[in-house]
Structures are given as structure tokens and as C-alpha cells.
Image (cartoon, rainbow, N blue to C red):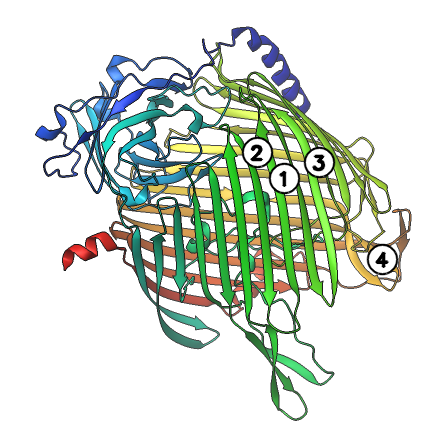
Amino acid sequence: MKTKFCILGLILFFVQISAQKTIASDSISRKKLQAVKKNQTLKIDGILDDEIWKNVPIATNFVERQPNNGKPQPDSLKTEVRFLYDDTGLYIAAQMYDPEPSKILKELTERDNIANDDIFGVIINGYNDHQQSMEFVVTAAGVQFDAKLTDNEDVSWNGVWYSAVKINEKGWAVEMKIPFFELRFPKKDMQEFGLNMIRRIKRTNTMYDWNLVNNQKGNYTLYDGTLNGIENVKTPTRLSFTPYFSTYVNSFDGKTEMNVNGGMDLKYGINDAFTFDMTLVPDFGQANFDNSILNLTPFEQQFSEQRSFFMEGTELFSKGDMFYSRRVGGEPSLYPTIGENETVTEYPAKVKLFNAFKISGRTKKGLGIGIFNGVTQKMEATIRNNETGETRKETVEPWTNYNVLVFDQRFNGNSSVTFVNTSTMRIGDFRDANATGLLWNIANKKNTYNYFGNFKGSWVKDGDTKFGNRGNLGIGKYSGKNRFEVIGNYVNKNWDINDLGFSTKTNYASYSTWYGYRILQPTKNFNNIYLNFNMNYDHRLEPFLYSTLRFNHNNQFTTKNFQNFGGGIEFTPLGENDIYEPRTFGRHLKVPGYFDSWIWFESDSRKKLQYNINIDYYAYDEKGRNRVIPSLYLRYRASDKLNLVWQFNPVFSNNEVGFAGKDGDQIYMGRRQRNTYENAVTGQYTFNNKMALSLAFRHYFSDVTYKQFYLLNNDGSLNENTTYNPNLAGTYNSWNVDLRYSWWFAPGSQLTLLYRNATSNYLDVSRLRFKNNFDALFNEPMINNVSLRITYFLDYNRIKNWF
């Protein structure tokens, strides 16, 4: 059935080609708008009846981006925008016409979360260089969203600005004030800002821009118009303080502790381009929980960053994927060495962060500079002598300095050259590390082709110095209907950036090619169609060994009713030589070839009930070996204030083969049955655009049963072994509940009250009954935590006016 589905996709593809529409011209026409100096007071309330707005030039004639790229916005839905300014910031008034105001969608959410909403936004580039813009969006429910735009949308950035929304007889209206301290612009008498504006009408899933954006090629920032008329504006002192207060009550295993913390984040604009961010006595106790799993792979699990200081302003530091911020304040790098009669009684789960700062920004000539520095404290473990009862301390992590340096030069719109350096320096006789990378991504003048690559080196000093390197080189076409990419890359055996980065597979070379067909303009039956064809070949570097040859096809269709569906196939006709599962250099495991097929469907997100269904089935060239991965997503929007989501993600792996142990040169593999179930429920009741109550629940269960053990031969084959029979059966549970109340009581200021309940266990048995498994889980000590955190934003420019 799944293969037939993919063939149907190909048939639909050829049927639709002739209906493809194109934009008439590839040239970029840039609109201009004049801002007017504000000469009287103005209240930001969303009511556009102030006399001051009447004689201000109007920006209108928006153009559709999706789904009908290039189509003028109809008069019945026209958008009118005006700009004022004074010495402190920009003021924006926007009237979104709508003949049916009662149908305007306005779901309430927390800040930075756009859901089933109409939206209006402005995108401003203070240097008008098409390199980096600031995005400010307001939903029809009055919820704010902001981000930085370069190659991607960095939603981690949070600005402090003001907005108000009103539904009126014409449609809906927005008033905004964007302080100049949130923008970057040069010191000169006459400013010329890059400007674009967006509007989305959710009930028709239609997106409009003030300046036409060609969805066939290039980044969004290439299509800015200009905002003129801003004269003699002094760049303000960009200095702000965000002190915090927090208190925690922790209960675990019959013990209750309470602590109180205080600290501050500081933000200072060094000049018009660069900002200094610092966290003093940081507190990350209310970070979201990690989705831990039973990890049977040769590699550590990678977790997403949950700490706000490390999540904000990541655009530069993420270049080259060489900085994994979870290393700063993560687990200690050593485990203590103990004697025969000693026991470790205390071992720190996390290293304490002493302080950290960032300097980042981009000059008017497109040079981005990022500097990060963090210092973590000395951490010790406690070891007890079981015979004498005496205890001693052993350092498991010394005082450590982490540093990241990034230079990113952007030019010609989409092109860039980047230098990245990371270093980890530990006091004393501990491991130090350094990594350096040079990256380039060069687009041609028409922004149709990209030539890209990188070369990176790593140095680890732990007694001896180990040097590793990796690199890649490729070319791609990312415009028009026909697109492709060809890329080759390698990683040598000594590549290691795990002191401040994240690396797993080494000692391989990979060569891949990709062809894609895009239909981005609506046809008779579809709004868009994506078809992709991929081929990948991998081999081991030292000594040379074929690893895998993989073919893949996947497709995606969006209907006129905004339903999405797709599917695909993937197969490895020659099987695989897995060079990582044996966990020994020079050894490999033969894995039979597989045929993977999948199908998925996503319902219309505008409906009260939305559901996503996916079925993925792997069939191996070995009798009885398969893997089934279904998933289900249900979202019910009970009202504009209440939203509920349930996700169910099971995995059933039958007769898989994996590492089971090692004895000298002998490596053992085990055939196992593994069943995993992950249930997650989230819910949110949003009182207004500043206050919300949210629930997050996750239960993860994984059960593994070993059936047979084998001795791994040097050629990767297996011999059945009846003498090796360890008990490797296991059951892992992870349980987390967060109930969080959030209140943005002032711009940039937040109160958060959190209740957290969590526990986990690992049992050396499997195939427990449902009741027995939960009885064992809930017999484990549970963490019960109540915490209150208050942050308050203080702007220097306002503080000085108080005195």
C-alpha cells in the first residue's frame, strides 16, 4: 500500500507540472515609505483615532506570498500602515481591513507562540543591508512574537517593546512602539531602514507582504523595501538590568529543603552594532525537563538547551554546529577513582555555573562577531572508606573556562564566510581542548546556486595531544522548480569536540546527492508539492570498508483545504557494515539490508480538532526482523483560551541485534526485542495575552528482552554462543509533570510559579505487567518541587528620568 502511495505521488507530480505558474519578473522592486516626526503625545491602545495619524503617509498595496505568490491583496482585505518616530523609538499604526470581523481568528497563547491567529508584523533592518533584520509580530489576540532574521529565524531572541490590539468595525487594528534601544543602526543624520511588513489571514491561510517576496529563491531579507524620513536620531544608551529573585522548596525521599536565590542579567549596547550580555549568579532551576530515553546506542543522548541565557541570541554561536551549550554547567568530566573498600557517597549531578557573558552583533559592512565566555566552579565528590568510616574529597571537575569566538562575514545577500573557535581550559592536570572551523557559503549573483564547504580541526590535550579534523564540500541549486545538491564530507578517527561541542560518528567519508522538484504556486488540486530523491554512500576511512548505500524518495502535498500528506520509501540494497555498534576500532557488524516505507497525514490546523498520523515500517532482509514506528498527534482547541495536546509515540523493534558486552578481544552481540511507549500531554489555559497556566506531562517506558547471544567474527558475521548469557533484560521509566503559572506583569518582566513532580527507574527485568511496572515506578522516591521566580526589566533610559 505504501509503495503504491509513493507511485501515486509521482503520477500526481507529472499531472501537475503543466499547471505551474511563475512570477513575471525576477527583479526586486523596492517600495519606499516616509516616516514622520511625532510632535505630540500618543497612547498605545490600538484605537487609531488620534489626530496625529491623519496626515502620515500610508503603506498599502500588499502582495500575496502564500499560496498565490505575487497576487495583489484585494481591496476588501487591504492593509494600511503608518510610521511615526521620536527620539525614543518608532511608532506604528496598522489597520487590517476585513469584511467579516467576527471571523478574525485570535487564539490566546503565551508570548512567542503563534497558533490559530491572524497576525501583523514589521521586519526592520537598521543598516538596510539585507543581512540581519529584527522581526516584531502581534497576533489579533494581542500576543507578541519577536525574532532575528538572517539565514534563519532565531526565535530565541526576546525584545522589549509595546503593542495593543483592537477588533473594530473595519477589521482589526494594531498600535506598536519599538524602542530604538532594540534596533541596530549607524550613527548618521539621515537613516534609511530596510523594511518589510507581513500580514496573515489564518482562516484562509493566506500570507501577504508589503514588498513582494519571491518564494522561488533567496532569503526573506533580500526583499526589503525602505523606510526613510528618520532624521537626527541619537542612538540611545542601550543598558538594561534584569534582576531576579527565586525561592525553591524541594522534597525528595522524605527530606525537605528550602533555598532562596538572587542574581541579575545585564545587557549593554557597546556601540550601535554590538551588545554585551552577562548573567551574574545564574539560576536555571525552572528550566524545562529533559526528555530522557533508554539509550542502547554507542553514542550519548543529545538534549536541547532549556536555559534562557543560552537560548537567546544564538544565531552567531550556532554557526558550524561546534558549540553545544549544555556542556557548560553539564555533568562533571571525571568520575572519582576509588579503592577496593571505598564507596562514592556524594557525586554532583551538575557542575555549577559561576558566571557567563556574550558579546554579539553585526557591523554595517556585514561582519558579525560573537564572543561567549563561561566559568564553572570546582566540584568534588565524597568518598567513604567502608572499613574506617573516614571520608575524603576528590575533584571531579576543576574551575573551568569555556570560550567561543565567531567571525561571520556576510556579503552579496546570501553569501558568508565564517571562522569559529572554541576552547575549554581546566585548572590543574585535567583535560583541555580547542576546536577551530572555517566555513563558507557562496551564492551566485542571481541567488540560484550555492557553493559551500568547511574545514574544522580539533585538539585535545589529555597527557598527549590528539588532533582530529573533518570537512565537506558541495554545490546546490536552491531556486526554481528543479533543485539539487551534491556534497562530500569526511570525519577522521580523532575528531573530538565533546568538551564544548557535540560529536558522535567519526572515521568515515560520505557522498550524497539530492534532487528535488517544487511546485510552489497553486494548481488545480494542490497549493504546493514537494518531491525529493536522495542517494547516499558511506565508507570507513581507516582501514577502508564499505559502510552503506542508501536510496530515498519522499514527498509532501498540501491540498486546497490545507491538509498535508505524504510518504516515502528508503532501502539499502547491499546491507550495511556498522562500524560503531561493536564499540571497538577496526571492528564492524554486518546488518542486513532493509526496505522502509512510510505514510503520513496532517489535518487542517485551523480546525478545533487537529490530528497527525504517521506509520513507518522497516522490513529487513532477515526473517522475523522488522521495526514498526506509528505515531499519533491530537490537538483540541476547546476555545481561544484552552488548548490540549496528546502525543503517542510507540516503537516496536523485533529481532534487532546490538552490542551485549566485551571480554578482552571478544565482542558479544545480542538479539533482542524492544518495545517503547512515549505518552505526552500538554495543556494550556491562557487568561489573557500576559497570563497563562500550562501543564506538561511525559511518561516514557522502554522494555528490552534478549533472546540469543552471539560472538562477533572479524568479518562482521555472527556465531551463536550459548556460554555467554548475562542478564541484560531491562525496563526503564521516566515520569515528569510540570504545572506552570506565568504572568508577564510588565514589559520584559515575568513571574513564574512552578510545581514539578518527577521520578525514574531502571529494573533488570522486562515484560512486566502494566500494574507491576507502575507499582515499581511509584515506589521510587519522587521529586516534588515548588518554585517561585520573579524577574523585573529595568531600562537605564527610564531609570535616569526618575531622578
- Report the side of 298 relative to 92 (left or right): right
Q: Is residue 441 above or below residue 663?
A: above
Instruction: Identify residue for label 1.
Output: 629
Element type at mark 1: strand
Q: How far apart are marks 3 and 4 (CA)?
A: 27 Å
* N-term-proximal mark, 4 vs 2: 2
Q: Tags 2 and 1 in contact by the CB under 8 Å rule? A: yes
**Is 221 in front, or is 254?**
221
**Quadrant of the image for the C terminus?**
bottom left
Instruction: Identify residue for label 4.
Output: 667
- The three-letter code of the residue at mark 3 reads Tyr
Q: In this view, does 570 lie above or below 692?
A: above
**Is 190 in front, or is 486?**
190
Determine crowd level at label 1: few under 14, some 14-19, many 20+ residues with C-alpha closer than 10 A. Answer: some
* N-term-proximal mark, 3 vs 4: 3
* N-term-proximal mark, 4 vs 1: 1
Q: Residue at horizontal 29%, vertical 32%? A: 191
Q: Residue at horizontal 64%, vertical 57%? A: 434
Report the disc number at residue 614.
2
- The three-letter code of the residue at mark 4 reads Ile
Element type at mark 3: strand
Q: Distance between the residues labelled 1 and 3?
A: 8 Å
Instruction: Identify residue for label 3.
Output: 618
Q: How far apart are marks 3 and 2 (CA)?
A: 13 Å
Whole-percent x, y for residue 88 in the image: 21, 43
Q: Which residue lies furthest to the top in this view?
A: 18
